[in-house]
Image (cartoon, rainbow, N blue to C red):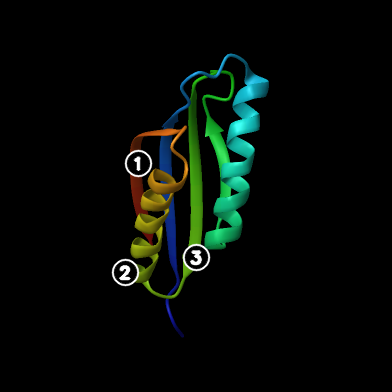
Amino acid sequence: MRKSAIGILNISLYLPGCMSLKEKRGRLRPLMTRLHREFNISVAEIDHQDIWQSALITCVMVSSNMSQTRRNLQQIITWIDNNWPDIDLVDEHIEILS
């Protein structure tokens, strides 16, 4: 039996210019939808829900290969940096569970 790898990526984001929670949701929702579609992962905002210009989202991926899981999660960070110029990555942390 093959061992599964669960990858967890926590990303702290800064959303400059957001002046309301409605505006924040309007900017985060398309990002999280695209992440789910592009990378086949689960995505959720897990903290800072009431702070207009800050968000902490978590992406979770399950696969059978630890190193591939880590590479895929690294690609997510690069993808956000390259495709979402109106959102700043403040910090990211990858954890792999096996």
Query: What amino acid does circle 3 point to?
Result: Val
In the image: residue 71, left or right of residue 39: left
Between the C-alphas of marks 1 and 2, the distance is: 18 Å
Q: Which is more toward the observer, 95 or 80?
A: 80
Tell me if 19 is positioned left or right of 94 in this view. right
* Vertical arrangement, residue 90 with respect to residue 59, above or below: above
Q: Nearer the viewer, residue 2 or 36?
A: 36
Q: Are marks 1 and 3 in contact (CB under 8 Å)?
A: no
Q: Which mark is residue 67?
A: 2
SS at circle 2: helix
Mark 1 lies on a secondary structure that is: strand
- Against 78, is 27 above or below? above
CA neighbours of label 2 inside 10 A, class few (<14), some (14 to 19), many (20+): few
Q: Residues within 10 Å of mark 3 (few under 14, many from 20)?
A: some
Q: Residue 10, image x and y in percent?
A: 42, 42
Mark 3 touches mark 2? (CB < 8 Å) = no
Q: Toward which corner of the image does residue 6 lie, by quadrant?
A: bottom left
Report helix, strand or loop for mark 3: strand
Residue at 35% in and 50% down = 94
Sequence-wise first label, 1 or 3? 3
Measure how far apart labels 3 and 2 are at the Cα level.
12 Å
Residues under labels 1 and 3: Cα distance? 18 Å
Q: Quadrant of residue 2?
A: bottom left
Image coords of residue 87 (percent x, y): 45, 33
- In the rendered structure, the answer to whether residue 27 lies left or right of residue 90 reads right
- Residue 40: x and y in percent read 57, 62
Taking depth in this image into account, of 19 and 91 the one nearest to the observer is 19
Residue at screen point 56% across, 36% down:
45
Which residue occupies the extreme right position in the image?
22
Amino acid marked by disc 2:
Ser
The residue that mark 1 highlights is: 92
Residue at the spot of label 3: 62
